[in-house]
Amino acid sequence: MSNIFDLTGKVAVAVGGNSVLGSSIAKGFAEHGAKLAIVGRNLEKAEAVTKEIIENGGLAKSFYGDVSSRESIEKLAKEIEAWSGGWDILLNAPGKNSSTPFFEIEMEEWDDIMDVNLKGLVFTTQIFTKRMVEQSRKGSIINISSVSSTTPLSKVFTYSASKAGVNSVTQFLAREFAPYGIRVNAIIPGFFPAEQNRKILSEERIASIMGHTPMNRFGNPEELQGAAIYLASDKASGFVTGTFIRVDGGFGCMTI
């Protein structure tokens, strides 16, 4: 019986693959046979992820990339193509957050978060997908959104707005790229204790989150792998595009 989740022969570009959630998904791809390009602004962290994948028998290489700079993204795409010939899977997992109260948000902070979470995702997808179309290479784009994109949450106003934009972009691009056989979907994670949200997790905040999470716990990064591998596999999700998969411990079925 064939394994519909087998990614052998596929090249996956994990932008933000040096982050807690991005690296977990990248490792899941590698365990299922994909060749990984681990991309991040912190090359040291990217190298650590790459080393772990290789030590576990996978194929990977680290690349520097700053999604807030178009020049950096274009250079990155050329470097990865020179290494692998092309790619089949693009994971958009970079992220910036802030707990600044609404009345104290400055334009610089707003722009900084939007540059990474939304604008960077759009232009990364534009550059990488254009090359896929030119090569007649079908594949999968997977965006990482957030529960705050659909439910108004306090303390993360700009982040929430950026992730709501990610949802809109995901569905727009699903229509845009469907004729080329490129699927565009998003994962909506619940609360995972990743680096960017540790600073806002006070005891009061944790109690509030647990009060709205039926499973009454945080997610483990490895629990995102199943959804991501499903979306990456043409055999498993070949007719799935413009879809959001929630991995949130039931948060989405609660009311705030």
Image: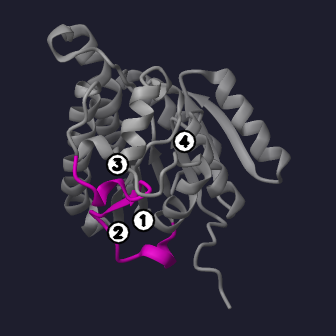
Comparing 157 with 115, the one in front is: 157
Marker disc for residue 181: 2
Of tags 4 and 1, which is closer to the observer? 4
Q: How is the image coloured?
A: one colour
Residue 137 to residue 66: above or below = below
Q: Horizontal placement of 21 versus 123: left or right?
A: right
Q: Horizontal placement of 137 versus 133: left or right?
A: right
Q: Which quadrant would residue 250 be assigned to in this image? A: bottom left
Q: Which segment did they paint magenta?
A: 233-256
Residue under circle 4? 21
Mark 2: amino acid? Gly
- Counting residues from the start of the chain, the first of labels 4 and 2 encountered is 4
Q: CA distance from mark 4 to mark 1?
A: 25 Å
Of tags 4 and 2, which is closer to the observer? 4
Residue under circle 3? 212
- Measured as percent of width and height from the top left, residue 24 is found at 61, 46
Residue under circle 1? 138
Mark 1 crowd level (few <14, some 14–19, many ≥20, 10 Å Cα)? some
- Measured as percent of width and height from the top left, residue 60 is found at 70, 44
- Please check the rendered image and state whether residue 235 is part of the magenta-colored stretch, yes or no: yes
Q: Quadrant of the N terminus?
A: bottom right
Element carrying mark 4: helix
Comparing 77 with 198, the one in front is: 198
- Measured as percent of width and height from the top left, residue 58 is found at 77, 53
Element carrying mark 1: loop
Q: CA distance from mark 1 to mark 2?
A: 5 Å
User: Residue 158, can we see it?
Assistant: yes
